[in-house]
Amino acid sequence: MDVIIFSGQSNMQGQSECLSENGIVNDAYEYKWLTDALVPLQNPVGENITYSMDQGYDFTPKTSLTSWLAEHALGAACYGNTNLVPSFCRTYTEMSKRSVLAVHAAKGSTRISEWLPGTSIYRILTEKARGAIRKATPERIYFVWLQGESDAIASVTKDEYKAALRVLCDALKTDLGIDRFGIIRVGRFTNDDRDTEIISAQDEICREDEDFAMLTDIATELNEQSEYMNPHVKGHYSAKGLETLGSAAAKVLCQRK
């Protein structure tokens, strides 16, 4: 069994417009930290975990975003809708012929600085991942990252973002023993040069550093096609978009092992 940790901000947490399907993924499980349990993997995924490491509450159309973000370190897929994790793992298990334990650890509206060692989110992320690793005793541990929109909004530079990625990867290698840091290259959110800084940082670090792997760069293409975008929330992918991103990324990870 391989452990795959899925982390990042809202598009990794999942903010699609519908629950497109919720069939169980063969040979795949999701680790639930709050109950220390392995459950069959299916949409919707994730857990609402507060900064106190207790059970939180679902993000629904009536939820105050400000309050939810202030209370939660990690979140389940918003509205109980589709996330990319099942699509990713379905493709991964079919291609690799290996079982997988998925760890969903994402939170919307976060900058990369909030995920670095020493932060509360990093502590809770690694605590959850360690629980999964103890359960699975995996042969391989992969970290899959979809994040950067908030850094673009904040005008984080390419070099600053690259440096933060390196810090995060080194910490995860030390603390969790990850074998590869896979990046789903971020899409366009600000639609100006601020996006380009983050996209370029992700492209460059995957070319320059063997610890990183570019799993897919199609997010920017999907941005231009309405069927792949959530019609209700700007800059976020639809269920079809997330499923497409997940499957494309899994194919590359299987080929890069």
Image (cartoon, rainbow, N blue to C red):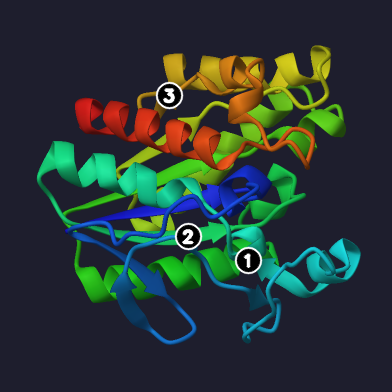
Q: Residue 236 location in percent, x, y?
A: 69, 37
What residue did someone put label 2 on?
104
Q: Secondary structure at mark 3?
A: strand
Q: Secondary structure at mark 2?
A: strand
Whether residue 179 sits left or right of residue 181 in the image: it is left
Whether residue 28 sits left or right of residue 175 in the image: it is left
**Cα separation between marks 3 and 1:** 24 Å
- Residue depicted at x 53% and y 60%: 105
What residue did someone put label 3 on?
214
Frontmost residue, 157 versus 190: 190
Q: Are marks 1 and 2 in contact (CB under 8 Å)?
A: yes
Q: Quadrant of residue 166?
A: top right
Q: Are marks 2 and 3 in contact (CB under 8 Å)?
A: no
Question: Looking at the picture, does residue 145 appear above or below residue 119?
Answer: above
Frontmost residue, 66 versus 177: 66
**Cα separation between marks 1 and 2:** 9 Å
Q: Residue 9 location in percent, x, y?
A: 66, 48
Q: Are marks 3 and 1 in contact (CB under 8 Å)?
A: no
Tag 2: residue type? His
Tag 3: residue type? Met
- Residue depicted at x 88% and y 71%: 67
**Cα separation between marks 2 and 3:** 19 Å
What residue did someone put label 1 on?
74
Whether residue 139 sits left or right of residue 180 in the image: it is left
Question: Looking at the picture, does residue 11 appear above or below residue 4?
Answer: above
Among numbered discs 2 and 3, the one appearing first in the sequence: 2
Tag 1: residue type? Leu
Q: Quadrant of residue 199?
A: top right
Question: Looking at the picture, does residue 253 appear above or below residue 62?
Answer: above
On the question of residue 85 being in view, the answer is: yes
Q: Residue 120 location in percent, x, y?
A: 68, 68
